[in-house]
Image (spheres, grey):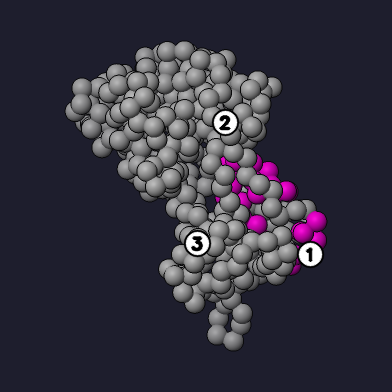
């Protein structure tokens, strides 16, 4: 199969769908890989590095889309990309369709087979291709939140660790999954006072076992959530409903009860966000303020560390990329976990959570 890797064009997105070592593995199995020139520039991988791995360098994205059977990306296709997709293409990337009617309609109209990293499952019920970026985003959420607590960044002027004789920052993490665990690791490591909220008692027991007295775990009822958020210096939104829109848990009304200059970091923004006042931002302008509360809602947080992110992502995606390259769409019949990644094909939405969010015929 001919596999194409276009350069990512989303704002400040420097990750790449295939790193040179992944290209080498695919070429070794008899596949052809075509890569847009400078696609790997953001991770320090030159065209020469890709050629050494066996890839052919193409002058532009149009050549990649026209020449490839399968397109491997990182972020969802932008309008100028989805119009280049056809019914003959397999698209393998993050999609997050439940919060993006325009993209969903664009993929439906293209006729392509669109397989989303974020809805592929594993035998344990996990999301193996979402996990590495959730790990990165979780860790970054604590780092970025701490940076924006500084007064010069618009925050309330709190050092996350405090110093002897002062209080450390109070960090509340909503959701105890992969993002939440990694946010907690970083926040605890930086000396914050950390509380994790979740609605699963088994998960809370697990979190208590691994963190011990380093964190406080609380069952996330409506009243507990409001109390915790209103007393926090930083709130990390780490709630995930696979393939569906994130629940809006923190309301605008709550903002007026929060400490002025507190920071909200919405890691669920790709799925619409879990704060009522969330709207997607970019690395160029990562924050905005509503009612005195700083909102950090960058939709591609791992793009800030593209080398780490691309390598971690490829470690997880490569086996599935190989399966699709070897067998095409027939690979979905052989692997039910890969089949769970199918979101759009033949002009129709194939993932129920997307249908629930947008309907069967979403308006672009």
Report which quarter residue 89 is drawn in.
top left
Which residue is label 3 attached to? 202
The magenta stretch is 253-280
Q: Is residue 349 left or right of residue 295?
A: left
Q: Is residue 12 visible?
A: yes
Give how far apart the Cα atoms at labels 2 and 1 are: 37 Å
Which residue is label 1 attached to? 257
Precedes in sequence: disc 3 or disc 1:
3
- Residue shown at 30%/28% (left/top)? 323
Precedes in sequence: disc 2 or disc 1:
1
- Residue shown at 27%/21% (left/top)? 32
Question: Circle 2 — which element?
Answer: helix
Question: Circle 1 — which element?
Answer: loop
Quick check: 8 above or below 208?
above
Give how far apart the Cα atoms at labels 2 and 3 are: 27 Å
User: Which mark is nearer the camera, 3 or 1?
Assistant: 3
Which residue is label 2 attached to? 352
Q: Is residue 6 left or right of residue 200?
A: left
Precedes in sequence: disc 2 or disc 3:
3
Place of residue 111 in the rendered image (x, y in percent of width and height, measured from the top left) = 51, 14
Place of residue 21 in the rendered image (x, y in percent of width and height, measured from the top left) = 26, 37
Q: Can residue 160 be seen in this view?
A: no
Question: Circle 3 — which element?
Answer: helix
- Quadrant location, the C terminus: top right
Instruction: Work out whether residue 14 or residue 134 is closer to the camera in this orientation and state it.
Output: 134
Density class for disc 2 (Cα within 10 Å; few <14, some 14-19, many ≥20) is: some
């Amino acid at each position: 199969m001919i596999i194409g890797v276009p350069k990512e064009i989303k704002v400040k997105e420097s990750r790449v769908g295939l790193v040179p070592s992944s290209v080498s593995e695919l070429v070794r199995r008899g596949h052809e890989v075509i890569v847009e020139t400078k696609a790997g520039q953001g991770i320090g991988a030159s065209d020469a590095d890709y050629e050494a791995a066996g890839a052919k360098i193409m002058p532009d994205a149009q050549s990649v889309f026209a020449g490839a059977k399968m397109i491997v990306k990182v972020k969802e296709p932008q309008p100028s990309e989805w119009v280049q997709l056809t019914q003959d293409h397999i698209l393998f990337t993050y999609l997050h369709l439940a919060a993006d009617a325009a993209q969903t309609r664009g993929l439906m109209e293209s006729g392509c087979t669109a397989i989303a990293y974020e809805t592929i499952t594993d035998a344990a019920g996990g999301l193996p291709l979402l996990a590495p970026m959730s790990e990165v985003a979780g860790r970054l959420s604590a780092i970025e939140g701490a940076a924006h607590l500084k007064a010069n960044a618009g925050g309330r002027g709190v050092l996350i660790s405090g110093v002897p004789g002062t209080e450390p920052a109070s960090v509340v993490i909503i959701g105890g999954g992969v993002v939440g665990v990694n946010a907690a690791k970083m926040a605890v490591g930086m000396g914050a006072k950390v509380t994790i909220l979740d609605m699963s008692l088994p998960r809370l027991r697990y979190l208590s076992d691994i963190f011990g007295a380093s964190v406080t775990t609380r069952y996330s009822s409506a009243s507990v959530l409001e109390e915790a958020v209103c007393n926090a210096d930083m709130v990390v939104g780490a709630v995930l409903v696979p393939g569906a829109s994130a629940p809006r848990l923190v309301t605008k009304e709550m903002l007026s009860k929060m400490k002025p200059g507190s920071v909200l970091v919405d890691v669920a923004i790709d799925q619409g966000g879990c704060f009522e006042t969330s709207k997607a931002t970019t690395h160029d302008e990562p924050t905005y303020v509503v009612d005195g509360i700083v909102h950090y809602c960058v939709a591609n947080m791992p793009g800030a560390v593209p080398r780490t992110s691309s390598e971690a992502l490829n470690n997880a995606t490569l086996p599935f990329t190989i399966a699709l390259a070897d067998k095409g769409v027939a690979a979905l019949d052989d692997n039910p976990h890969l089949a769970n990644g199918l979101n759009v094909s033949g002009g129709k939405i194939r993932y129920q959570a997307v249908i629930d969010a947008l309907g069967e015929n979403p308006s672009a």
